[in-house]
Image (cartoon, helix red, strand yellow):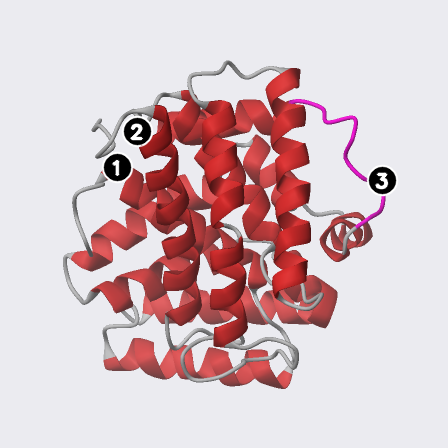
Amino acid sequence: MKLLPRIQVEGGAEWLARAATQCLIDEARLSPKPGLVDSRGNGAHHDLSLALMERSAHSLTPTFQALAQQSWLRPADIALRQTIGRLGREGEQQMMAATDGVNTHRGAIWALGLLVSAVAMHGGVGSAQQVANTAAELAKLPDDAAPRLFSKGLRATHRYRVPGAREEAQQAFPHIMQRALPQLRLSRQHGSETHARLDALMAIMTSLTDTCVLSRAGLEGLDAMQNGARAVLNAGGSAHPEGQMALAALDRHMLALNASPGGAADLLAATLFLDRIESPYLTH
């Protein structure tokens, strides 16, 4: 358990906001990601680019800072949950203004917003598991002002009867805590930071019911994503030649299906954030 570099509210909130923003940028730049925007190109997207993703990430810095400020040393109650919901929706509007109406980071606002708030609720002190547990407490609380309209992700969860981003948060982010974060730290011992992050993404993709993939490519796409990610890790991960071949094959398959695992990408950004919270003085 470690302290943030600057523990005062303003300094801590600013640090958290910059950390969350940088994790979104790090996720976007990570390459090669199957079907996703990265430094090579737009993946399966026609309306996204790396420059747009980075602009979107920077537009969210004030939202993350406001979330941290409002949550600092606050208990998990309905009043805070509604404040977080309002700030998240305002942040989504700012994001849409910055991207000319393209949904770049709606899912990331939910995941990272909850985690930023949860760290602040602990006063900047806490393990990744403590932060995830607190974020789950928040996610379980009602927000009466939340819009009733179904997003693509929510429609997919209902159509296929699978858990989505809401359930992931309410369960304390099991794909991060049980899969991605352990894989990230294990792979760091044997390869580069890029390979470690790619392996963490694969760990998420092995079992996540990614609603972005379901919306675009149905169960065929989901099976292709999960099986392909398992093949990468079973081949030794992205640092190994066989793993790189499996990753390239998965990328081709995702592009052929027009499938993009955006839900997994959101959770990877959140994984990088929790990793950074536990090691605030390290640059990976």
The kind of secondary structure element at disc 2 is loop
Say whether disc 2 or disc 3 marks the residue closer to the N-terminus: 2
| Mark number, residue 8 | none
Q: Which residues are magenta?
A: 141-150
> Residue 13's spot in the image, x, y percent?
39, 34
> Residue 196's spot in the image, x, y percent?
27, 61
Q: Main secondary structure of the magenta part?
A: loop
Horizontal placement of 249 versus 31: left or right? right
Residue displayed at 67% across by 60% down:
96
Q: Which residue is mark 3?
A: 148
> Residue 49's spot in the image, x, y percent?
54, 77
Q: Which residue is mark 2?
A: 127
Say whether disc 2 or disc 1 marks the residue closer to the N-terminus: 2
Q: Nearer the viewer, residue 220 or 78?
A: 78
Q: Nearer the viewer, mark 2 or mark 3?
A: 3
Horizontal placement of 138 versus 175: left or right? right
User: Given contact means CB atoms under 8 Å apart, are the residues at marks 2 and 1 in contact?
Assistant: yes
> Residue 95's spot in the image, x, y percent?
61, 57
Q: Is residue 258 above or below residue 166?
A: below
Q: Is residue 208 above or below residue 3?
A: below
The kind of secondary structure element at disc 1 is helix
Q: Nearer the viewer, residue 134 or 185?
A: 134
Instruction: Give neighbour class at mark 2: few <14, some 14-19, many 20+ (Cα, 10 Å).
Output: some
